[in-house]
Amino acid sequence: MATVAETRMARMPPVFAEPHPQEKSLTALRRQADACERCDLFKHATQTVFGEGPLEARVVLVGEQPGDQEDIAGKPFVGPAGRLLDECLQEAGVDRTLCYVTNAVKHFKFERRGKRRLHAKPNAGEIQRCAWWLGGELELLRPDLIVALGATALYTLMGRSVGLTKERGHILAAANGKPILVTIHPSYLLRIRDHDDRTKERQRFISDLKSIGDQLNA
Ligand code: URA
């Protein structure tokens, strides 16, 4: 299936160019997001899954949207992709507890197949409406580095389609000059069937994540 990067989505204001919510704390912003009806995704999701981590985090990791387990737990990256992310961060020498972890889209979008709820990609309108919250989180956190995990996060942060394959491992400048480290989404690794390919790609992901430390110490 085509990714966001491959289908070239419309330009939108990058998150930093959006007028931000006026909330003065992450707690207040989260409370406001709990009642979000900016798009229709709230209608079927269990709850808003807001970002999590310390206010003083120097690094913000941005994924796509909560999955099935995150939707139920109300926490980002706690399912299979999250566990893999944790392992890779650890191998890269990055302490997740010192990072703020969030998503571009705060509600789980899915299609029902019997009892299963299968991930469905958020569209450009949903991404754009939800960018309001990410913009608010980043405004309050003011991190030194933002890590775009996959094409949706990258699109949201840059406000335009950027070739993930081309820019992977690079640091791009966001509209406000903030550095954005480009890498894949961990769920990409979960989809690779071939053992050797998966091992190779996992190592590449870890090596991308090692740039977090390099960037912070630069
Ligand atoms: N995938 C994401 O992008 N975010 C999550 O929180 C979980 C899975």
Image (cartoon, rainbow, N blue to C red):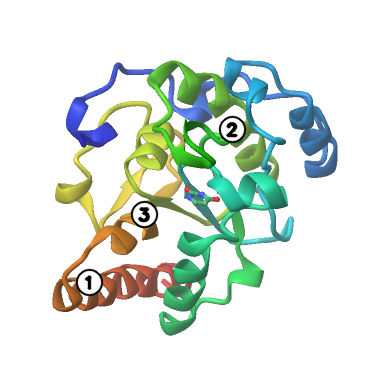
Q: Which residue, given by chain and number where applicable, does mark 1 sit on?
A: 198
- Residue 188 location in percent, x, y? 30, 56
Mark 2: amino acid: Gly
Q: Nearer the N terminus, badge 2 or badge 3?
A: 2
- Residue 195 location in percent, x, y? 19, 77
Q: Nearer the N terminus, badge 1 or badge 2?
A: 2
Residue 210 drawn above or below residue 24: below
* Residue 2 located left or right of residue 70: left
Q: Nearer the N terminus, badge 1 or badge 3?
A: 3
Q: Residue at x 15, y 72 (%)?
A: 197
* Residue 38 located left or right of residue 119: right
- Residue 209 location in percent, x, y? 38, 69
How far is the residue under mark 2 from the one under mark 3? 20 Å
Is the residue at mark 2 in contact range of ligand 1, meaning its CB lies under 8 Å from it?
no
> From where the camera sits, is residue 142 visible?
no
Please name whichever residue, 20 or 202, is drawn nearer the observer in this view of the structure: 202
* Residue 112 located left or right of residue 22: left
Q: Quadrant of residue 3?
A: top left
Residue 159 drawn above or below residue 196: above
Please name whichever residue, 163 or 117, is drawn nearer the observer in this view of the structure: 117
Where, quadrant-wise, is the C terminus in this rendering? bottom left
Label placed on residue 135? 2
Q: Residues within 10 Å of mark 3 (few under 14, many from 20)?
A: many
> From where the camera sits, is residue 84 visible?
yes
Mark 3: amino acid: His
Q: Residues within 10 Å of mark 1 (few under 14, many from 20)?
A: some
Secondary element type, mark 1:
helix
Q: Residues within 10 Å of mark 2 (few under 14, many from 20)?
A: many
The mark total stands at 3
Q: Which residue, given by chain and number where applicable, does mark 3 sit on?
A: 185
- Residue 37 location in percent, x, y? 69, 17
